[in-house]
């Protein structure tokens, strides 16, 4: 490895450390609640790394949101669906919602990302527009279009937007209210089987919501 490769590797490592630290801290405390000193201490990097690599705390936050959105988008088929029969649309919607549920729940990193997304929904920052365009708009639109196909309706109606929001909310509720669920189940964390059961349930509920 030459000097440039070494420098690039160090740069990637520093950026990755700050993004991981930002995900952990911002998901718990929000953008305003986190200090730059906390970020560098959590990441184990120098104070100068934040302005050098990201321009400031807000730049780290934007990178964390992009990291979370990209991680979820990478696990979903968000290509605009061609008009489909009710049966084909139902199968596609069920699969999409199961994948979305797993993306929100199946690791500690995904859980932190889910909490960060919930924070942006409740108190949007100036970074929300990018998050909306990257993740929420294509996901919401696809769910609404598949719901329309299941119901054999023309796409783009207001009712379909509301129905899509309700369907997506079923998955988000498991992520946002995770602690209450863990206490009710009497477990410290969701098992792989728990996540699989939840995903299957959410897939079925999505279809039922289109009846």
Image: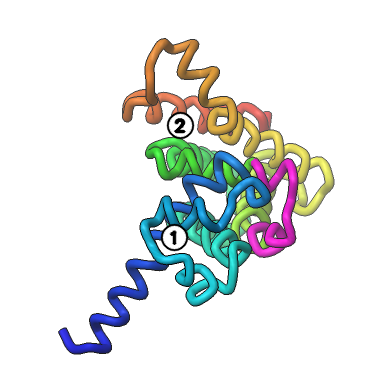
Residue 175 as seen in the image, left or right of residue 102: right
Looking at this view, name the residue that lies furthest to the right: 158
In this picture, residue 114 sits left or right of residue 3: right
| 124 shown above or below 3 | above
- Is residue 22 shown above or below 174? below
Q: Residue 138, image x and y in percent?
A: 63, 58
Splitting the image into 4 quarters, where does residue 115 fall? top right
Q: Quadrant of the C terminus?
A: top right
Query: In the rendered structure, does residue 32 fall within the stretch colored magenta?
Result: no
- Answer with left or right where residue 96 lies relative to residue 158: left
Q: Earlier in the sequence, mark 1 or mark 2?
A: 1
**Number of numbered markers:** 2
Residue 120 on the magenta span: yes
Label 2's element?
helix
Magenta-highlighted residues: 119-132
- Crowdedness near tag 1: few (<14), some (14–19) or many (≥20) residues, C-alpha within 10 Å: many
Q: Residues within 10 Å of mark 2 (few under 14, many from 20)?
A: many
Q: Which mark is residue 199?
A: 2
The residues tagged by marks 1 and 2 sit, at their Cα atoms, a distance apart of 31 Å
Q: Residue at x 64, y 41 (%)?
A: 118
Q: Assess whether mark 2 and mark 1 are in contact (beta carbons under 8 angstroms).
A: no
Element marked by disc 1: helix
Residue 33 percent location from the top left of the image: 64, 46
Q: What residue is pinned by disc 1?
A: 18
Of the 4 image quadrants, the one containing the N terminus is bottom left
């Amino acid at each position: 490895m030459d000097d440039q490769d070494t420098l690039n590797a160090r740069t990637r490592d520093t950026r990755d450390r700050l993004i991981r630290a930002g995900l952990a801290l911002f998901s718990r405390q929000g953008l305003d609640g986190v200090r730059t000193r906390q970020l560098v201490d959590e990441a184990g990097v120098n104070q100068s790394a934040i302005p050098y690599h990201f321009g400031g705390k807000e730049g780290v936050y934007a990178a964390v949101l992009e990291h979370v959105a990209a991680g979820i988008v990478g696990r979903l088929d968000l290509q605009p669906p061609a008009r489909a029969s009710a049966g084909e649309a139902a199968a596609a919607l069920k699969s999409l919602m199961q994948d979305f549920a797993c993306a929100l729940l199946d690791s500690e990193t995904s859980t932190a990302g889910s909490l960060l997304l919930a924070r942006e929904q409740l108190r949007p920052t100036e970074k929300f527009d990018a998050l909306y365009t990257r993740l929420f708009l294509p996901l919401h639109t696809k769910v609404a279009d598949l719901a329309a196909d299941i119901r054999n309706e023309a796409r783009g109606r207001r009712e379909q937007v509301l129905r899509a929001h309700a369907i997506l909310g079923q998955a988000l509720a498991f992520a946002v209210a995770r602690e209450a669920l863990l206490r009710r189940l009497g477990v410290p964390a969701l098992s792989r089987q728990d996540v699989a059961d939840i995903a299957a349930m959410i897939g079925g509920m999505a279809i039922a919501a289109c009846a």
